[in-house]
Image: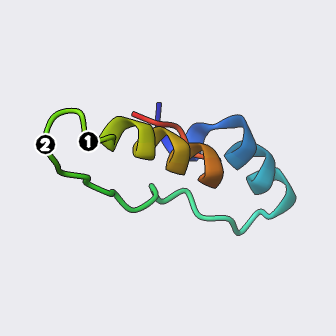
Amino acid sequence: MNAAATPEALAAMAIDPHASLAPPPCLVVMGVSGCGKTSVGRRLAQQLGLAFV
């Protein structure tokens, strides 16, 4: 799911017709297996109101 298509983003665009449809920046997290990359990514996406892909 594209983060720009989340219900929150669509609601924001309904309020602000000048809101951007540009996708959010991409963040790549690297590390060894089991160090918590997925946990950090999910938590970050949740805090930012974005979809975790």
- The percent coordinates of residue 7 (x first, y second) are 72, 36
What is the three-letter code of the residue carrying label 1?
Cys
Residue that numbered label 2 is attached to: 32
* Local crowd size for mark 2, using a 10 Å CA cut-off: few (<14), some (14–19), many (≥20): few
* Secondary structure found at label 2: loop
Please report the residue visible at 80 percent of the width from the left and 46 percent of the height from the top: 11
* Secondary structure found at label 1: loop
Q: Is residue 8 left or right of residue 33?
A: right
- The percent coordinates of residue 23 (x first, y second) are 45, 55
Q: Is residue 18 left or right of residue 39?
A: right
Please report the residue visible at 16 percent of the width from the left and 48 percent of the height from the top: 31
Residue furthest bottom as drawn: 18
Q: CA distance from mark 2 to mark 1?
A: 6 Å
Q: Nearer the viewer, residue 52 or 41?
A: 41
What is the three-letter code of the residue carrying label 2?
Val
* Local crowd size for mark 1, using a 10 Å CA cut-off: few (<14), some (14–19), many (≥20): few
Where residue 6 sits, quadrant-wise, is top right
Q: Is residue 8 left or right of residue 52?
A: right
Is 31 situated above or below 33? below
- Check residue 35 in the rendering and tell me which mark sits there, or answer none: 1
Please report the residue visible at 61 percent of the width from the left and 54 percent of the height from the top: 48
